[in-house]
Amino acid sequence: MDVKHEEGLGERHPEPPHGRRGYRSLINNPRLLLSAFFLALVFFTFGFDGSVGGGILAMQPFVQQFAPNKSSDGVPYLTATDISILTAVPTTGCLLGLPLAAALGDRIGRKKTLLIGCIISAVGTAIQTSAFGIAQMVVGRWIANIAIFIFIVMASTFLAEIAPENMRGAIVGLSIVLIDSAAVLSAGVNWAVSSDSTPLSYRLPLGLQIAFAVVIAGGVLFLDDSPTFYLTKSRDDEALRSLRQIRRGYTDAEVEAEFSALKGQAALRETEKEVPWMDMFRGTNLRRTLLALSVGNMQQLSGIAFATNYVTIFLASVGVSTSPFLLTLVVALLALAGAVAGMFLVDAVGRRPLALTTFTAVFVVDLVIGVLGFMDYQTRPAIAQAIAAFSCMFAFFFACGFGPLTYVVASEMPTARLRNKTSAFSFLVLACFSTVVVYVLPYISQPDAGNLGAKTYLIFAGWMAGCIVITYIYLPETKGRTPAELDAMFEAGVPAREFASYECNASIESYLSEAKASAGVSEVEHL
């Protein structure tokens, strides 16, 4: 099959000896690597915002500035209500950010929507950095969260649409690596300034986020939009150009086969059929929407709030002799190690095995910390150290499993035309659930409220037990499947446990075989 390249978009390469390319093909794909990096970088703002926000709550200059209450001896303190408002209310920015992402992503494209998100992020950061009261801080963080949810939807969709099907898990999984890298940076910055007695101790970490928005905007400017977006607009020439740019090193036949597979997605063209929001809950799309919702919402009561928003406060309340800011940095480093492991495991072992293994590990950790919570850890340092150690283990296993799976599952389950809408809805539900959890937890765990402390982890353990059962019954194995294959398999009603072994004729290999067969017939006819 003779396919002509547009000038400067690619060169011919010999046919690979073993079918679709592996990770070594990335060497010939600098455009794909840079695109994936800058798109994953938007998750950096998400990880940094969550981690830095939890750290500054424990800083004395922040408490002195923002705490409206004082104890009987005149020492200012943040109540459970103050903490809930500062951490939970800003996440309601999703109510504006997610609909914007869904509408703009389909109308003007993924690239332009991300640039709008960068502008909103810079404005929100400026407001919270200059804040002198709780109200201004909440408004600034609320605006910043509008951008964060635009980033999450657009970047996860964009990454899934440009990734080769055999590397989709790892490339989308870059998101959690960048989230946890940001957590390491913010934990390090918080630790470094934690001894500073001036407002700089919390204004510096907050203000750094403006730099992230500038860097992301600069990188996104040089990206082309995704091939799938162009196809939905019936701009096939631009879609093929975009695909070739991120498939350097692939043969003409491979690029054409992947392009055919992309065009084989169900209800792809915008002009063919209007796809309303309610289609997410009709027919086979209902199953796909529920699956897209699954992993992200399972994580909310896994204990992650105690490992991010409240990690510094929780470790300080346990009474460990080591600085809680230093322990927070250790937690962040172990989470980063887990994220890197999960990024490769999600494609190596598959979605189901990784989910079942890591979810079980998280359940065990939750159960152990919850049981230790019944012991007197305030006067027994060994118990406090054990709780801190298992908190670190939680960070590793959570990042290894929930980390990549949250974004991989949410991005690859929906159909092409519903991907933005389903992702936006999934993260809206996730944000609402997260808001409730983050708001309620201080009333359960804090000494001035429910005072459960480490015993709260028993609630997380019970939740994880149910999640393991649901995952085993309903989560399908989608490793290595093209979007067209997933469309066909969901339409056929394939049970979750049969996805891995199901044979489907919508794979890229089938298009390659078809092209070779057509070429052979043409040669015979020519003779």
Image (tube, rainbow, N blue to C red):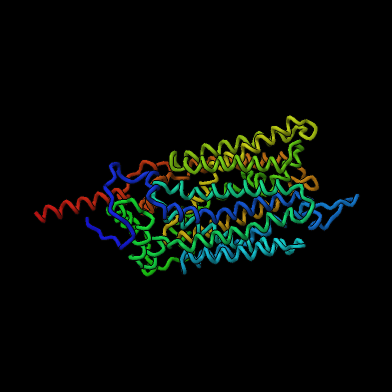
Q: Tell which residue pokes out farthest to the front in this image.
A: 8
Q: Quadrant of residue 62?
A: bottom right
Horizontal and vertical percent for residue 420?
48, 61
Residue at 26%, 48% (x, y): give it.
14
Answer left or right for 343 relative to 140.
left
Q: Quadrant of the C terminus?
A: bottom left
Q: Position of residue 349 (x, y in %)?
A: 44, 38
Can see residue 494? no
Q: Residue furthest right?
A: 73
Direction from residue 141 to residue 149 in the image, left or right: left
User: Which residue sits at x=32%, y=49%?
Assistant: 507
- Residue 391 position (above or below residue 512): above
- Residue 96 vs 385, above or below: the answer is below
Q: How many numbered marks are there?
A: 0
Q: Is residue 129 left or right of residue 511?
A: right
**In what quadrant of the picture does the N terminus appear?**
bottom left
Camera-side residue: 507 or 49? 49
Q: Position of residue 265 (x, y in %)?
A: 36, 58
Q: Position of residue 367 (x, y in %)?
A: 64, 35
**Residue 453 occupies quadrant:** top right
Lateral position of residue 316 relative to residue 255, left or right: right
- Is residue 96 in view? yes
The residue that appears at 35% across and 45% down in the rendered structure is 21
